[in-house]
Amino acid sequence: MDGFDTSDESEGAVVTSGVVVLFGLTVLGIVLVFMFKRFGVSGGFLAGSWLPLASLALAFAFRDQLGRSILAVAIVVAIVSVFMVGAGIMLTVRARGEGSGRSARLATATVLASTPLLLGLVAMCRSRVT
């Protein structure tokens, strides 16, 4: 079986980390596509920049129920966050080049989308110190 087994032997349920990652990427991808279609690319990015941080907060809130699957959720959040940061940098540079007033809001949304990555970096550095 690929990934790690997150089974609960009392109920007989088996969910691999790959399934959790694919499901999470699919759900977040659908939400982002909906926001991009509804609000346009820049507006969709502004509306969806909170998704990585909100997903991480929900995973942390339900960490007891998720068990070892929280690692798969963290992978999904990191992937989405990297995508969002790349898109945010591109949109911010484009808005700044056009002289649009949205560049400051896009830069702020990019920082918000990068927050899970920054928190992960802090956690890794902190675990090395202790």
Image (cartoon, grey):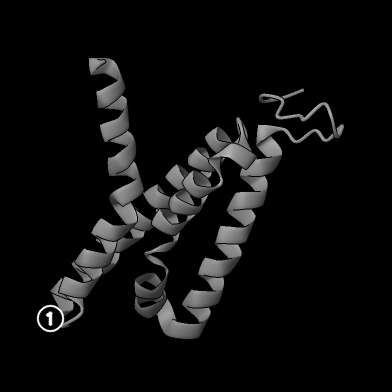
Residue pushed farthest right? 12
> Which residue is disc 1 drawn over?
99
- Image height of 98 relative to 45, above or below: below
Numbered circles on residues, count: 1
Q: Which of 127 and 45 is in front in this view?
A: 127
Q: What residue is rendered at 50% in x and 48% in y?
A: 61
Provide residue 50's location: percent of width, then percent of height.
38, 64
Instruction: Name the quadrant containing residue 119.
Output: top left
Q: What element carries label 1?
A: loop
- Image height of 25 relative to 4, above or below: below
- Image height of 29 relative to 25, above or below: below
Provide residue 62's location: percent of width, then percent of height.
56, 46
In the image, 33: left or right of 117? right
Q: What amino acid is labelled 1 in the image? A: Gly
In the image, 3: left or right of 106? right
> Dividing the image into 4 quarters, which one contains the C terminus?
top left
Q: What residue is rendered at 15% in x and 83% in y?
A: 101
Q: Which of 38 and 128 is in front in this view?
A: 128
Provide residue 86's location: percent of width, then percent of height.
33, 54
Q: Which of 59 and 121 is in front in this view?
A: 59
Q: What residue is rendered at 77% in x and 30% in y?
A: 8
In the image, 126: left or right of 48? left
Q: What residue is rendered at 38% in x and 57% in y?
A: 84
Q: How crowded is mark 1: few (under 14 residues within 10 Å), some or many (20 or more)?
A: few
- Image height of 28 relative to 65, above or below: below
